[in-house]
Amino acid sequence: MSNDRLDPANDAGFGFLELIISLVLLSLLSLTLTWSLRIGIQTWDKVTKDQDAQADVYFAQNALRLFLSSARVDPNAQGTMPLKFEGAADNLVLIARMPEQFGYGGDYQVAIKARRREGGQTDLVILPSVYDPRTGERATPNRSETVLLSNIKALVFRYLGAPTEIQSPEWSLGWNDRTKLPVLISLDITFPDGSNRFWPTLLVAPRISGALVP
């Protein structure tokens, strides 16, 4: 007659095998969760760093937009005297009202340029000098500079305007000895290889674009 009862030894062995399989699966699940958590932390850290780096770009663009949009004609200029606006491809000097967040007040003659450091790094900087509207000259030059954006590769200014009254506006890499401000100013900046920042082309229209007023 066959014995229908289960063998206790077999029961114990089957339970132990299940336990081993469960532990293995639990270990694999733990490793998967740990790996996923690590990847998630690394991704979050990279995204946060990228956002912080790009935030510097947006800050620089907002500051430059304030400078360029508030470009002013020289109140002391007479007739066809040139503007105090010296635009080149790699730098720009203009009279502008300093943004309040820089802690300055009034009109300044501001130089915007790339500054190369001893270690080879290049920064986008501004150099403000107090502008005296009574004389049309810089008062006490401010020798300190403010870094708007660190570690750039190169910058290029372009200016849109008509060379003469009878010509159509066109883009050029310089704007000097003119009696009007350009219609538009653009600035492109490139970054060193491997940088995770990008610079959307900055386009600014000066608020005062008419001829000089005696």
Image (tube, rainbow, N blue to C red):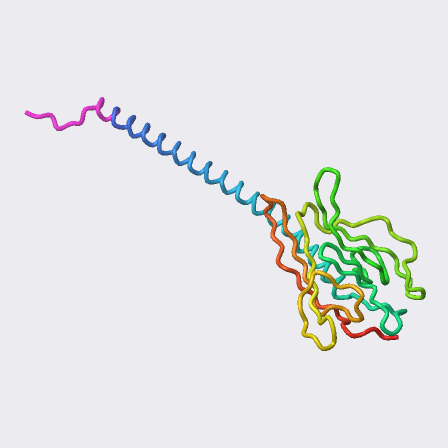
Side (left or right) of 96 relative to 36: right
- Farthest residue in the left direction? 1
Tell me the quarter of the picture where residue 31 sits: top left
Position of residue 117 relative to residue 9, above or below, is below
In the rendered image, residue 180, in percent from the top left (x then y), is placed at 78, 71
Q: Quadrant of the C terminus?
A: bottom right
- Residue appearing at x 74%, y 41% in the figure: 117
In the rendered image, residue 159, in percent from the top left (x then y), is placed at 70, 64
Nearer to us in this view, 81 or 46: 81
Nearer to us in this view, 194 or 62: 194
Number of marks in picture: 0
In the rendered image, residue 111, in percent from the top left (x then y), is placed at 80, 55
Magenta stretch bounds: 1-12
- Residue appearing at x 67%, y 66% in the figure: 171
Q: Quadrant of the N terminus?
A: top left
- Farthest residue in the top direction? 9
- Farthest residue in the bottom direction? 166
Position of residue 20 relative to residue 133, above or below, is above
- Residue appearing at x 19%, y 24% in the figure: 7
Tell me the quarter of the picture where residue 28 sits: top left
Position of residue 16 relative to residue 100, above or below, is above
In the rendered image, residue 153, in percent from the top left (x then y), is placed at 66, 47
The answer to whether residue 90 is magenta is no
- Residue appearing at x 68%, y 45% in the figure: 151
